[in-house]
Image (cartoon, rainbow, N blue to C red):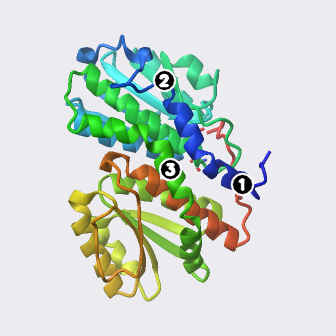
Amino acid sequence: QKNGYETFMEKEIAEQPFVIKETLRSRIEDHILMPELDDLAMEDIHAIYMIACGTAYHASLYAQYLGREWLSIPIQCVPASEFRYGNYPVDEHSLCLFVSQSGETADTLAALKACKKKNAKTIAVCNVLDSSISRIADTTLYTCAGPEIAVASTKAYTTQLTLLACIMLKLAELAKVEVNGYDQLLHDVKALPETIESMLGMEEQMKEYASFLKEQHDAYFIGRQLDYVSVLEGALKLKEISYVHADAYYAGELKHGPIALIEEGTVVIALATQKDVASKTISNIEETIARGANVILIKAKGVHSDKIAHQIEIPDIHPYLACLPATILLQQFALWSAKEKGCNVDQPRNLAKSVTVE
Ligand code: M6R
């Protein structure tokens, strides 16, 4: 049931504060509570692989970033469709983490089976109880997003980000790593439901920005570091439901090719929530403006440029969590672009909710 919303996607976007709260239930006190991982001997782990598809792959990229910051173990994120045919040195000292909303994605399932055969330790992050992936993995941790009906993943993604942040904090604890700013981070994780709730009120602004795409066939998303993960997801959301061609680039890569695409009126959605690299992103943005780009900037407090006409600020939050509020804005942007174009938001063409065949 759509509970009065016009589409399932709108209902699912609105449910995010609640499902994030559910995902965090009994997970946080003054440290992360994750008894499922208590027996994991991190000293035996020599490599970590994160394996998933589509939006779940983007969530894995987020976890990979945190893992690189905190763990001194090599960590690699690979799309499942590549992993299953690639030659990765997986063995009993590998920890393989599979992220899947449905728990039924064919490529992810095949990659999991291959890793089990090589005696790797396997952990799944799933949303569907008793799904194939959750039954085969050694351990499954569940997101509590509830049924996601719209093909475009929204609440499954943000609950994955939330749970993966907790999982990576738990792995750091098991590896006896001291995480810088741990208390602040934990505080901001706990506050995520309220932070996300406050983002829902920004819909009108994103609706106005989405109207910039009315006459456009392309949109370019740019960001650095964790913002790159968010722009990948923002571009995927936009293309899958509104059929606007959308690409995501590392902001610093623009001048190595993509900037050739920028002309008068080109829509560029830029993210600068990572303060330590924000000034670099701002100068990349200004280069696109000099070539006529119409830029929408999603930024953290304190990041500034007078040259950018359209700016929207996310609430004050630990930079490792900034992608959650930023993602809500990008979901609304894609949603309203699709609605404006009269697209079927819940059932985009050529796509299935669960990709159970290769
Ligand atoms: O069920 P899964 O999380 O394994 O699905 C993986 C992808 O097919 C999925 O995330 C897809 O990219 C999204 N529906 C896009 O919004």
Point out which mark residue 196 bears: 3
Which one is nearer the viewer's eye here, 322 or 136? 322
Q: Residue at x 71, y 44 (%)?
A: 149
| Left or right of 129 in this view: 140 | left
Residue type at numbered disc 3: Ile
Q: Disc 3 vs disc 1: Cβ atoms closer than 8 Å?
A: no
Residue bearing mark 1: 346
Residue under the image location 33 percent in, 25 percent down: 30
Judge from the rendering whether residue 191 lies leftward or rightward of residue 291; answer left or right: right
Between disc 3 and disc 1, the foreground one is 3
Assess disc 1: are there few (<14), some (14-19) or many (≥20) residues with their C-alpha within 10 Å of its C-alpha. Answer: some
Q: Is residue 126 above or below residue 33?
A: below
Kindly indicate whether the residue at mark 2 contacts the one at mark 1 (C-beta within 8 angstroms).
Answer: no
Going from the N terminus, do you reach mark 3 or mark 2 first?
2
Visible in this render: residue 98?
yes
Q: Position of residue 48 (x, y in %)?
A: 32, 29
State the CA–CA distance, disc 3 to disc 2. Answer: 19 Å
Q: Which residue is drawn at 59% across and 71% down?
A: 207
Mark 3, Cα crowd under 10 Å, few <14 / some 14-19 / many 20+, is: many
Residue 85 visible from this viewpoint: no
Spatial separation of the CA atoms under disc 3 and disc 1: 22 Å
Which of the two residues, 57 or 307, is positioned nearer the viewer here? Answer: 307
In this figure, which residue is indicated by the disc labeled 2?
A: 26
